[in-house]
Image (cartoon, coloured by chain):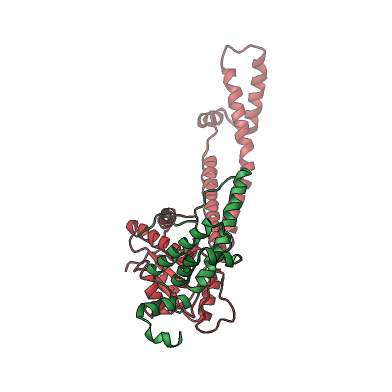
Amino acid sequence: MPQPAAAVRAALNALPRATPRQLVRTISTARAAPAKRPIAPSATRPLSQTHQSLVQRRFYKTVEEAKSRYRSGPFSWKAGLLFVLTGIGLVWYFESEKERMKRKRIAEATKGVGKPKVGGPFSLIDQNGNTVTHEDLKGRYALVYFGFTHCPDICPDELDKMARMFDLVEEQRPNSLTPVFVTCDPARDGPKELKEYLVEFHPKFLGLTGTYEQIKAMCKAYRVYFSTPSNVKPGQDYLVDHSIYFYLMDPDGDFVEALGRQHSPEQGAKIILDHMKDWRGQWRKD
Amino acid sequence: MGLFGLFQSEEDKRAEEIRKGTVAPTRAERQKCWASRDLFYACLDKHNIIDPIKDEKAATKKCSSENAAFERDCAAQWVTYFKKWRVQDIQKKARLKELEAQGAYKMDVQTEFAPKKD
């Protein structure tokens, strides 16, 4: 920062030194003009003449010099140089300031100011038994939904909605969205159960499960509330309480927006497509 | 089940597993359950029974066949859940009606899945 600031200061310091002469010169030329004309009343003539002579005595040694000064007007190479230097200094200052603000914004964004920290690294198993991590989701947007296969009414509805949203997005921008279903009930939802369940909604859904600890960490990262009733005996039936949002994640794995039950599939798809239009980063090619 | 378990057909075994919650129902099984639930709800509506858990006696007496079908087609947990849900839903609707009568502004919030795919 010191360099551009110093340049401006130097330019500003140079300014007062240059101005008085220029100012006086402008006044002198303005006053001198009517004096040359014969129309002006005779009373004013001696006054303006004394003024002119005063000014002349102060600055110009000869009439020739005064005449040459008058011809060039208020512009001189010094004024021109000052103008150019000040211009360069200001441009330099504003450019560097702009760059600084940009860096500041990026730094603050990663610090999480005004941006919810949802999501993060994970390692889970998909419905085919393969390990899936956050790295596998990068390069595409991801729509993440949490639920469980024994869910009585809301999850099946929402998964149908997710399938419709996915199809709508896929029509416009093929291969740029991964629909992800994460179970909140890892005790009962293994890869086999997930596979049977999800294939009825959409063949492209990615189902994720893991150990109880892994799922708990995943839910915590996504700020998902879920509760399995305590003291469940093996084989006993139960329902799981959980949050019902779709989490839209960008290709860097950062949280973008949460879609809720109030959004129709068409509205949801539009929101997702609008975000995709804004995305300036990398897309996965495969 | 005891001895009868031996004579159970595949289909009955599957239905039993769904009721006990050992397996998750498929889409068709879910729809069968929801259909039975709606019939049960309709019967309760007809007899002005709001809470089938509190008014269990009246519910089982007036809607015994519907209740039996409901319990046959859905997981036991779902039956309890849907019975409780009915009370909440009726209360919610009544409250909304009350608010509307008071001139409350209704926000455009969609809670139903709009176009059914199937």
Query: Relative to residue A4, is residue A204 depicted above or below?
Result: below
Q: Quadrant of the C terminus of chain A?
A: bottom left
For chain B, give the colour: green
Between A130 and B93, the one nearer to me in the picture = B93
Q: Determine the image quadrant of residue A223.
A: bottom right
Q: Is residue A44 left or right of residue B2?
A: right
Residue A46 location (% of width, % of height): 66, 17
Q: Is residue A31 left or right of residue A72?
A: right
At x 38%, y 82%, the residue is B8
At x 64%, y 25%, the residue is A53
Query: Relative to residue B70, is residue B114 depicted above or below?
Result: above
For chain A, give the colour: red
Q: Determine the image quadrant of residue B15.
A: bottom left
Residue B70 location (% of width, % of height): 47, 68
Q: Could you tell me if residue A132 is visible in this image?
A: no
Residue A149 location (% of width, % of height): 45, 72
At x 43%, y 63%, the residue is B35
Q: Could you tell me if residue A41 is visible in this image?
A: yes
Between B94 and A220, the one nearer to me in the picture = B94
Residue A227 location (% of width, % of height): 57, 73
Between A280 and A64, the one nearer to me in the picture = A280
